[in-house]
Image (spheres, rainbow, N blue to C red):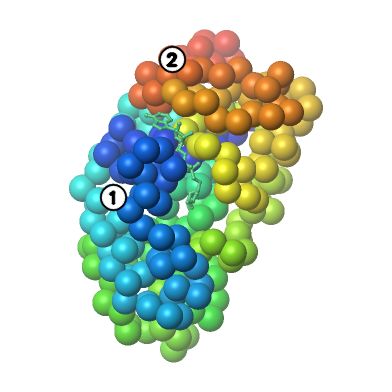
Amino acid sequence: MKKIVVFTGAGVSAESGLGTFRDSDGLWEHYRIEDVCTHEAWLRNPQLCVDFYNARRKDTLSAQPNAAHMAIAKLQQALPTTRIITQNIDDLHERAGSHDVVHLHGEITKLRSENNETATVPLKGWEQHYGDRHPDGSLLRPYIVFFGEGVPYFDEACRIASQADIMVVVGTSLNVYPAASLIHYAPKDCPIYFVDPGHPEFGMWADRITHIQKKATEGVPELVEKLIKELGA
Ligand code: APR
C-alpha cells in the first residue's frame, strides 16, 4: 500500500482561526520570539512564557478542526499507512480523527519536565500555573520546542519522510529548520504536493513540487479525493 506522508504548518489551522506566525498580522508581529519562545526567555521571565502559551491554549481549545484537518483524517482512514507530521502545537489533527501524529514543535495540551524534553504530562483546561512541578520534581514548563532547542522527534520524522511514496505539504513557509528540511528526505521519485495560497520559496525543489495555490480547506479536500481515487482506496 502506498505510503503518504502529510507535513503541515500553521496554514492548515489558519481557517480554524488560529494565527500563523509570518503572514501579515502573524503572531511574531505581536510578540518577540526572544521574549516568549527561547530557553533564555523561559529562564528570564517564565511567567511571560506561561501567559503567552496560556493564551495560545485558550485559542486552541475554542478552535474547531476545519475541512482540511477532516480531509487529512479521511485520507489516513482510507489509507492506514498515511502518516502525519506537523509543526503545529494545536491538537486539531487529533480532534479531526487523525492518529499517531508526530508533533515536531511540541503540543499545547501538554506540559513537560524542565529536566527531560519528552517527559510530558497532560494539562486539563487552558491555564498552566507557573510553579507547579513535574513528578520528577522539576518545574513544569510548556511542552513547546523553543527556538534553539533540539527537536526530539526529528529523526523519527526523517525516517517516515524517507519512506514516502507521496508527500503532501500544507501551509508552511518552510522558514524554520530543521523541520523545513523534511521535504529533502522524501525519496527522489516521490511527488510532493504543496497546498498553500502564498508563494513559499521552493528553491531547488521547484521542479519536484506541484503547487496547489489554494487555501487548505479548498485545496486539501480536492487533493485527498484525487489521491483516494488514484490509489483505489
Ligand atoms: N491555507 C493554507 N496555507 C495558508 C493559509 C491557508 N488558509 N493561510 C496561510 N497559509 C500559509 C502561508 O502562506 C505560509 O506559507 O501558511 C504558511 C504559514 O507560515 P508560517 O506562519 O511561517 O508558519 P509555519 O511555516 O508553520 O512556521 C513554522 O515557525 O515560529 C515557528 O514553531 C513555529 O511551527 C512554527 C514554525
Q: Answer above or below: position of 10 versus 202.
A: below
Residue type at tag 1: Thr
- Rounded to the nearest angstrom, the CA distance separating label 2 from label 1 is 26 Å
Taking 149 as reference, is 114 left or right? left
Q: Secondary structure at mark 2?
A: helix
- Which residue is identified by label 1? 60
Rendered-image quadrant of the N terminus: top right
Q: Residue at x 54, y 71 (%)?
A: 117
| In front of the other: 86 or 203 | 203
Q: Answer above or below: position of 184 versus 35.
A: above
The mark total stands at: 2
- Which residue lies most toward the right here? 188
> Counting other residues with Cα less than 10 Å from the Cα at mark 2, is it few (<14), some (14-19), or many (20 or more)?
some
- Which residue is identified by label 2? 222
**Quarter residue 20 falls in:** top left
Whole-percent x and y of residue 127? Answer: 24, 68
Q: Residue at x 21, y 48 (%)?
A: 62
Q: Residue at x 45, y 73 (%)?
A: 41
Q: Secondary structure at mark 1?
A: helix
**Which comes sooner in the sequence, label 2 or label 1?**
1
Taking 162 as reference, is 112 left or right? left
| In front of the other: 44 or 154 | 44
| In front of the other: 89 or 96 | 89
Task: Find ligand 1 in the image and state its quadrant.
Answer: top left
Q: Is residue 26 visible?
A: yes
Residue type at tag 2: Glu
Whole-percent x and y of residue 35? Answer: 41, 67
| In front of the other: 216 or 203 | 203
> Counting other residues with Cα less than 10 Å from the Cα at mark 1, is it few (<14), some (14-19), or many (20 or more)?
many
Q: Residue at x 51, y 12 (%)?
A: 226
Q: Answer above or below: position of 162 versus 135.
A: above
Q: Is residue 90 visible?
A: no
